[in-house]
């Protein structure tokens, strides 16, 4: 197996709405090459991972098998890279239908398999479901969408995926460095162009291509977001039953630390938070206060709880330092404190009440921040109170 890296001056997409939902997470633009379309018989022969560098710019790391028998090495090294780089979510093109099911199937039963259980921002799914592109271009292939946005000419590869498979078969025999370069370039260009495609499509928070009336905040509420340090996905919506309106936050438990717990939060009377390890899922349901066609939550008890935990953590950390010990604050404690601060800065936070809907109009930006905050808060409680 061989490892290759190449640095680029490119930047990852930054948008106001995207930043609210995904900006605090560490992304990885991900693509694979395989010997076939079926994970039952095909093998992973090459992975590409494009990540943001701390000093600026981006790096593409590739793991190439020199024979089909090195698939496990490729998958293991890729998984170790994801963990070492603290990756929180993938950005893919049709990855939810192909790349990720494929690597998860090929990794099943391996000690590193859970590294691939990350949220996936699938740009193909996004384009197909939420934008006008299916009605204005004849195909949603990545290269066709690149042409639509005027970036296809930036590509430097000259082969198709099918030709890459044929070249790899020859490469396993002759180890021709020219063929190796062609295979790597094809794979590398896919993630490089996907990053450029995200930036091109994301201008003006994607509003130029979104279906009429949609915003990225509303899409994220439905499509879900990476939450709780990558341990969960989180989506949010309203429900009404027997005259009682609720806000419901739900999603998947990712990785190998799923919990089973049923919580009845003191902060929200009548609410519940249920975590199921067997289904790798969770649901938080909170009853809303209503006045006319407006809905809101009393956030004071939760805010007091979070602030108390934060103060205690800071005090314990200071005491430990005075005694010569190093104490690391839980990332989730820091995360929920940061999310609470962001919510408080929202114009919808009024005297410790969070307004989620006014005159029937949902505030999806506040709903999403609430989903991220509560999923983070209650997954910590679930881990402490497992059945």
Image (cartoon, rainbow, N blue to C red):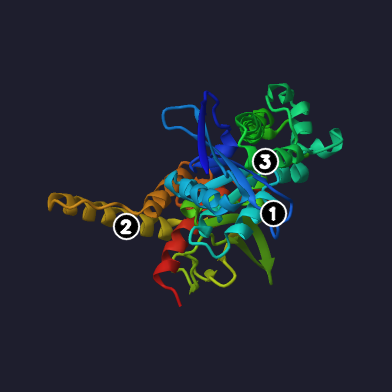
Q: Which residue is mark 1?
A: 42
Q: Could you tell me how many numbered marks the image carries?
A: 3
Q: Label 3: state its secondary structure.
A: helix
Q: In this picture, is 137 found above or below 100?
A: above
Foreground residue among 182 and 260: 182
**Residue 134 lies in quadrant:** top right
> Mark 2 or 1 closer to N-term?
1
Mark whose residue sits in front, 2 or 1 = 1
Q: Is residue 102 left or right of residue 142?
A: left
Foreground residue among 55 and 238: 55
Q: Which mark is residue 303?
A: none
In the rendered structure, are the residues bearing label 3 and label 2 in contact, judged by CB atoms less than 8 Å apart? no
Q: Which residue is mark 2?
A: 308
What residue is at 55 percent from the left and 54 percent from the top?
Answer: 72
What residue is at 50 percent from the left and 66 percent from the top?
Answer: 258
What residue is at 54 percent from the left and 48 percent from the top?
Answer: 74
Q: In this picture, is 333 found above or below 23?
A: below
* Residue 211 point in image, percent of width and height: 77, 39
Q: In this picture, is 354 found above or below 49?
A: below
> Mark 3 or 1 closer to N-term?
1
Q: Which mark is residue 168?
A: 3
Q: Is residue 207 left or right of residue 120?
A: right
Q: How far apart are the two marked residues, 2 and 1, measured between alpha carbons?
A: 53 Å
**Residue 237 lies in quadrant:** bottom right
Q: Is residue 370 visible to us here? A: no
Question: Which class describes the residues within 10 Å of circle 2: few (<14), some (14-19), or many (20+)?
Answer: few
Q: Label 2: state its secondary structure.
A: helix
């Amino acid at each position: 197996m061989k490892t290759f890296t190449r640095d680029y001056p490119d930047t990852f997409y930054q948008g106001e709405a995207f930043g609210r939902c995904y900006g605090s997470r560490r992304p990885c633009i991900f693509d694979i090459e395989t010997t076939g379309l079926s994970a039952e018989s095909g093998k992973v022969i090459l992975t590409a991972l494009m990540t943001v560098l701390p000093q600026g710019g981006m790096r593409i790391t590739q793991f190439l098998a020199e024979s089909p028998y090195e698939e496990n090495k490729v998958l293991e090294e890729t998984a170790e890279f994801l963990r070492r780089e603290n990756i929180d979510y993938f950005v893919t093109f049709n990855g939810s239908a192909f790349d990720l099911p494929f690597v998860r199937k090929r990794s099943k039963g391996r000690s590193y398999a859970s590294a691939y259980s990350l949220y996936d921002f699938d740009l193909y799914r996004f384009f197909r479901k939420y934008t006008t592109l299916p009605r204005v271009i004849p195909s949603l292939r990545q290269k066709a969408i690149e042409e639509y946005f005027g970036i296809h000419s930036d590509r430097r590869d000259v082969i198709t995926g099918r030709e890459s498979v044929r070249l790899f078969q020859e490469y396993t025999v002759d180890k021709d460095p020219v063929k190796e370069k062609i295979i790597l370039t094809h794979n590398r260009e896919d993630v490089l162009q996907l990053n450029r495609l995200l930036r091109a499509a994301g201008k003006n928070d994607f509003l130029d291509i979104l279906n009429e009336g949609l915003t990225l905040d509303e899409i994220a509420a439905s499509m879900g977001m990476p939450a709780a340090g990558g341990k969960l996905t989180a989506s949010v919506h309203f429900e009404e039953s027997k005259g009682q309106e609720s806000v419901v936050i739900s999603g998947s438990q990712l990785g190998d630390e799923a919990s089973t717990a049923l919580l009845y939060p003191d902060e929200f009377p009548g609410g519940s938070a249920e975590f199921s390890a067997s289904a790798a899922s969770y649901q938080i349901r909170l009853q809303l206060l209503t006045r006319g066609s407006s809905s809101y939550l009393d956030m004071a008890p939760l805010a007091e709880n979070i602030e108390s935990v934060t103060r205690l953590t800071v005090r314990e950390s200071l005491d430990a330092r005075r005694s010569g010990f190093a104490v690391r604050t839980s990332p989730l404690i820091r995360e929920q404190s940061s999310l609470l601060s962001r919510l408080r800065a929202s114009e919808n936070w009024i005297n410790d009440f969070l307004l989620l809907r006014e005159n029937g109009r949902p505030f999806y930006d506040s709903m999403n921040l609430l989903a991220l905050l509560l999923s983070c808060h209650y997954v910590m409680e679930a881990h402490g109170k497992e059945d």
